[in-house]
Image (tube, rainbow, N blue to C red):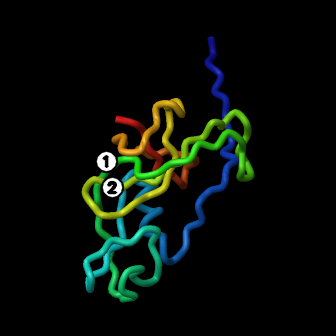
Amino acid sequence: MTEQIKETTYTKPIPFKTIDNAPYWDAADAHHLVLQKCTDCGQYAHPPGPACSHCGSQNVIWEDQGTEIFGEIYSYVISYRPFLPGYTMEDCPLVIAVVKLKEQDITIIGNVLNCEPTDIAIGKPVQMIWETINEERAIPQWQLV
């Protein structure tokens, strides 16, 4: 018996790689988190930009944070209807969270996957996972721990 493989096309928006965020997405595609850090004031910045969002310095570097990324839910919203192109009612409810990282004083937005909306609460611990959406892109997401 021959197993049939169903090929699916990712229809949701794919984050656009720019000169300012390319290191972030290149690392995400390899299932790593890198964060932009200012060498003048020592603050991390996310989303990344051409200069430090805290002091305006252009002296920024990228620091590899690795693959084991933990945080806690700082804020969240639950969407019960699709609100972006490519999303359908099958994707709902969608849990969108602002997560404060455990090791750095910074927040990152992402979806909390594989959970029920009733499982979500501010302060709940989460771990970053990467959703590979095509051969070129993986998106950082979250799961409850």
**Which label number is shown at residue 70?**
1
x and y percent of residue 35 in the render? 35, 66
Question: Between residues 92 and 67, which one lies in front from this camera angle?
Answer: 92
**Element type at mark 2:** strand
Q: Amino acid at mark 1?
A: Phe
Percent x, y for residue 89? 73, 36
- In the image, residue 64 sits, relative to residue 76, either above or below, namely below
Quarter of the image containing the N terminus? Answer: top right
Q: The disc labelled 2 sits on which kind of residue?
A: Leu
Q: Are marks 2 and 1 in contact (CB under 8 Å)?
A: yes
- Give the percent coordinates (x, y) of residue 135: 55, 50
Looking at the picture, does residue 103 appear above or below residue 5? below
At x 74%, y 52%, the residue is 85
37 or 41, which is in the foreground? 41
Q: What whole-number distance in Å separates the C-alpha atoms at marks 2 and 1? A: 6 Å
Q: Residues within 10 Å of mark 2 (few under 14, many from 20)?
A: many
Say few, some or many: other residues with alpha carbon within 10 Å of mark 1 (under 14 / 14 to 19 / 20 or more).
some
- Per the image, label 1 sits on a secondary structure element best described as strand
Q: Position of residue 5 (x, y in %)?
A: 63, 27
Q: Which mark is residue 101?
A: 2
N-term mark: 2 or 1: 1
For this view, does 91 lie left or right of residue 67? right
Residue 36: image tag: none
Q: Residue at x 67, y 29 (%)?
A: 6
Residue farthest along the bottom direction in this orientation: 57
Image quadrant in which you'd find residue 16: bottom right
Farthest front residue in view: 122
